[in-house]
Image: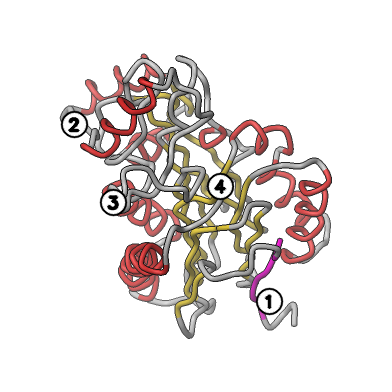
Amino acid sequence: MMGQVQPKLIIHGGAGSSLRSKGGADAVRLSLYRVIEEVYGMLLAGASAQAAVVRGCQMLEDDPRFNAGTGSVLQSDGQIRMSASLMNGSAQRFSGVINTSRVQHPIDLALFLQDGSDRVLSDYGSLELMRELGVPSYDPLTEIRLKEWIQERDHNFSKEMAGVVAEKELVSEAGRGTIGVVALDGEGQLAVGTSTGGKGFERIGRVSDSAMPAGNYATHHAAVSCTGIGEDIIDECLAARIVVRVIDGQTLLQAFERSFIEAEQNRRDFGAIGLDRTGAIAWGKTCPTLLAAYHDGTRMGDTLDLPEEMVTGGIASPAHA
């Protein structure tokens, strides 16, 4: 049974410098809309925000176009280590895994940990959890990521990070890789999930923002998922900062605007998406491209063709109009 709230959904597949061509944008749009169609259908059928978020993350983790799950980038030693987190806004409960390996859906481990007393596990802990759960070993490596790593190794890893959108060309310029899903269900509950393969070529043991409240945070007021330079997101404590501003009385769009003005002043490089309990949808970016799509209850839309200079935007709910 549906509640009294119109479900809303927004997802992202990274942020960065550019999409190489209109064809690149169209291909990304198809990938994102496929997720929106299935997951929004779940919400209309009465699925919880948490269930919708997990399914959306699974689909994005399975798409080799994005840097999470299958298609994750390789770190400096040629290994794939992924991080993911889930936050249930109604329960205000955060769970996640850091630098986990050999798993198809890191978000599934975060989901299991929602009900535990130990809710964030590192690489060794997540591996032991996989054994306990009988999760089959899975190799997320793709040929394009391996070629990308070999190419960069030959240049002594001079790049700070890998590309994140696998197009026909070997290395994309689309930027900083993470996937994220934010959902508001028919009962008015919020949830958010974020998953990543890291920035690529990084020092062994580096920890992403994606398994921190800085990059993934929700309460019953609002929920936000971030993407971009993880260190910049951590320094701004971006997701939690935006949500706290909503708790303190700002609208979601005002909270995004203020937070991204500060980020611009601090020369940060990232993007974010969010929802609040009234159904407002918002996004922001300090980089040219944000790979995000949404369903506002009436139609699907996306942020792929936003002007490079645009910092924040969104759709106000009737309560905020």
Q: Would you call the spot at circle 2 few (<14 residues within 10 Å), some (14-19), or many (20 or more)?
A: few
Quadrant placement of the C terminus: bottom right
Quadrant placement of the N terminus: bottom left
Q: Is residue 161 left or right of residue 56?
A: right
Circle 2: residue type: Tyr
What's the distance in space between the residues labelled 3 and 1, CA to CA?
A: 30 Å
What's the distance in space between the residues labelled 1 and 4, CA to CA?
A: 25 Å
Q: Would you call the spot at circle 1 few (<14 residues within 10 Å), some (14-19), or many (20 or more)?
A: some
Q: Which residue is mark 1?
A: 316
Label placed on residue 63: 3
What's the distance in space between the residues labelled 2 and 1, CA to CA?
A: 41 Å
First-in-chain label (3 vs 1): 3
What's the distance in space between the residues labelled 2 and 3, CA to CA?
A: 15 Å
Q: Position of residue 229 (x, y in %)?
A: 59, 37
Residue displayed at 50% across by 64% down: 10
Q: Which residue is mark 2?
A: 138
Quadrant position of residue 36: bottom left
Q: Which residue is mark 4?
A: 91
First-in-chain label (2 vs 3): 3
Residue displayed at 50% across by 62% down: 292
Q: Nearer the viewer, mark 4 or mark 3?
A: 3
Q: Nearer the viewer, mark 1 or mark 4?
A: 1
User: Are the two marked residues, 3 and 1, in contact with CB atoms closer than 8 angstroms?
Assistant: no
- 45 over 263 or under it: above or below: below
Q: Position of residue 149 (x, y in %)?
A: 33, 27
